[in-house]
Image (cartoon, rainbow, N blue to C red):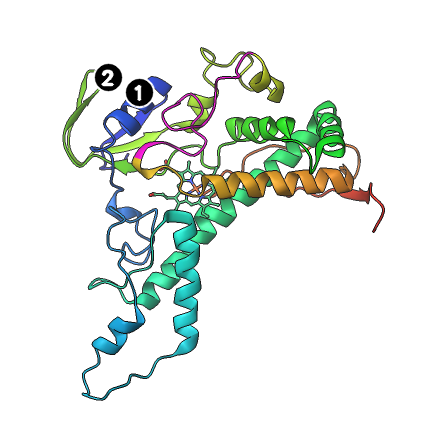
Amino acid sequence: MGVQRVLIVSHHETAKECLTIKDKAFYTRPSTLTLSYNHAMFGFDPYADQWRQMQLYQLWDGKKDGSDNVLVDMKNLFENTTLNMILRLIVGKRILSSEKHEVDTINKATYLGLIITASDTTTVTLTRALSLLLNNKVELKRLQQEVDIHVGKDRLVYLKVIIKETLRLYPVGLLSVPYKSMEGCTVSGYHIPAGTRLLVNLSKVHRDPRVWSDPCDFRPQMFLTTHKDKDFKWGNMELILFSSGRRMCPGVSLAVQVLELVVASVVQGFELKTPLGEAVDMTEGIGLTNLKATPLQLLITPRLPSS
Ligand code: HEM
């Protein structure tokens, strides 16, 4: 691509080789990805290792004026603290000011990073899930019945497979975030020099006819029958919903819970239809994430008493 050497992987076996077996080689991201505050944004920074702890004590300890106290902007401190809590929840790490970045820069990069990695991805997937349900009314009814009967009591099994099937057909990115090989290695018998970029064609892997019959159809029930074993756990590369290996999505548990909660709440609480009863247009738009080209506008009527 241009002057870059890029390895594009479209088979799950090769994706597994790159992202799990050889993940040490493909751990890093290309540095040109850093629209991201000079590598301060997690998820796009090459090694995710510049994050270090920011502690109040360090502020006091670093003061140069010989006094026994230090002036602290509490709002900044609280922002850093809450952000740290979110980060610990998501990535198990705290924010770290470093020689390379001021805490403020890391803050900005992190907010932007969270918008892209957490908010955008979830929004796009929710829109796709509802669109698919609107275009498959039988599945929508089945889901509403499950929620009506089982909510608060049992696991919502059908809900889970609808989310899975949505992400299979519409992964948040059609291609993975680029990786870069840090060392030369062999992939599927080919020598891959250090510095090669790697893109996994998630969309193609998820629609591989060797694994999925009628790969372009919305068939959530297959995850309860013929494809029961296909999960997005570590190492199963036929369904790379949250990637795999060292750079796998750290927000997976949160994402799945939010997706399930929102879809279940909407279909439980409302009847939904398109304005003219027309099918929802699923055409892909242009963006960092796999957003729809047209907005999803629905007429909604409550199906539960307002209380
Ligand atoms: C529908 C929801 C989501 C999906 C499908 C999703 C999917 C993914 C995928 C496929 C990747 C890896 C890309 C690659 O390297 O090829 C990724 C990375 C990442 N995701 Fe998510 N994600 C979702 C939600 C979230 C949420 C809610 C958070 C945080 C709260 C999050 C945080 C991240 C971060 C920080 C990375 C970068 C990890 C790294 O490079 O080390 N994601 N996500």
Q: Quadrant of residue 20?
A: top left
| 98 relative to 177 in the view: left or right | left
Q: How many C-alpha atoms fall within 10 Å of the one at disc 2: few (<14), some, or many (≥20)?
A: few
Residue 72 appears in the figure: yes
Cα distance between the residues tagged 1 and 2: 7 Å
The percent position of residue 305, horizontal first and vertical second, equals 85, 46
The percent position of residue 188, horizontal first and vertical second, equals 24, 17
Considering the whole magenta stretch, tell me its main secondary structure.
loop
Residue at image coords 40%, 73%? 76
What's the magenta region?
226-245
Mark 2 element type: loop
Q: Is residue 242 magenta?
A: yes
Q: How many C-alpha atoms fall within 10 Å of the one at disc 1: few (<14), some, or many (≥20)?
A: some
- Compared with 56, 235 (above or below) is above
Mark 1 element type: helix
Q: Is residue 38 magenta?
A: no
Residue at image coords 66%, 31%? 154
* Residue furthest front in the image: 153
Return the residue at label 2: 188
- Compared with 189, 288 (above or below) is below
Residue 87 or residue 278, whichever sits in front = 87
The percent position of residue 169, horizontal first and vertical second, equals 53, 26
Residue at image coords 56%, 13%? 214
Residue at image coords 74%, 26%? 137
Return the residue at label 1: 14
Residue 293 appears in the figure: no
> Label 1 is placed on what type of residue?
Thr
Looking at the image, in which quadrant does ligand 1 appear?
A: top left
| 251 relative to 197 in the view: left or right | right
Look at the numbered disc 2 and say if its residue's Cβ is closer than 8 Å to ligand 1. Answer: no
